[in-house]
Amino acid sequence: MRWRVFQVLLAMIVAAGMTTFTLPAVAQSAARPQVKLPEGPVRSVLLKNCVSCHGIDDYAFHAMDRKGWQELINTLHKEQRGVVLSRRDERILLNYLEENFGTESVPFPRNYVASEITEFFDNPQARIFLEGTCTECHELRVFEHRKDVPGWRALVLDMRERGASIADLDIEKLVEWLGRVRGTNPVE
């Protein structure tokens, strides 16, 4: 019993660290999605059954229907790792995965590695880039939001997946600028 309590506490500490610790854009070797640990019953299911082996960020690499998620759980978790989920926990987990990482979501690209940049956008350059790239499909909305660097990177990569023509170095210059100007810790 003490071992199980220790495992749950360790999983909670790891999960808390995963949701609060991020590296600067230039220090990251590979870009990873940043999935926030949800509240409610699914949080307990994730902490009890999932995060001791992998982070919840891994879900963002997929966009599957309920059947696909069920097959993944059956194959990789139940059969290969012997994970035992109660029917209730499995239903809660599948509902969460289908709602947040279903077929309507855009999977985070696995092969993207953040380039190290030595040149940075100043405000006029960034504005020109945004107006020339983003407004081809929609109005400019970045000034309505605040995100951390991984959040901006995920958004810009999503826009590229949807057809925006953005080179890797421009992604990182834009992400760095957005993190500086529209980040979650603005200088006031």
Image (cartoon, grey):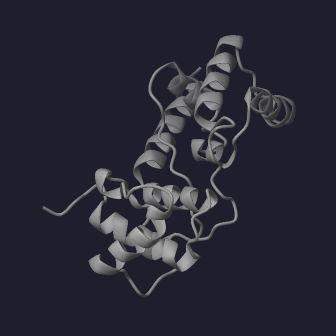
Please state if 120 lies on the left or on the right of 8 as rendered: left
**Where does the image place residue 159, in percent across and percent down from the top left?**
55, 58
Quadrant of res 128: bottom left
Residue closest to the eye, 54 or 180? 180
**Where does the image place residue 89, in percent across and percent down from the top left?**
64, 17
**Where does the image place residue 95, in percent across and percent down from the top left?**
63, 22
Please state if 21 lies on the left or on the right of 89 as rendered: left
Residue at 60% across / 29% down in the picture? 99
Residue 122 seen by the camera: no
Residue 117 seen by the camera: yes
Residue at 61% across / 56% down in the picture? 162
**Where does the image place residue 179, in percent across and percent down from the top left?**
35, 64
Looking at the image, which residue sits at the far bottom? 118
Looking at the image, which residue sits at the far top? 88
Please state if 101 lies on the left or on the right of 12 as rendered: right
Looking at the image, which residue sits at the far left? 188
Residue at 78% across / 27% down in the picture? 70
Count of numbered circles on the image? 0
Q: Quadrant of the N terminus?
A: top right
Residue closest to the eye, 53 or 184? 184
Quadrant of res 140: bottom left
Q: Quadrant of the C terminus?
A: bottom left
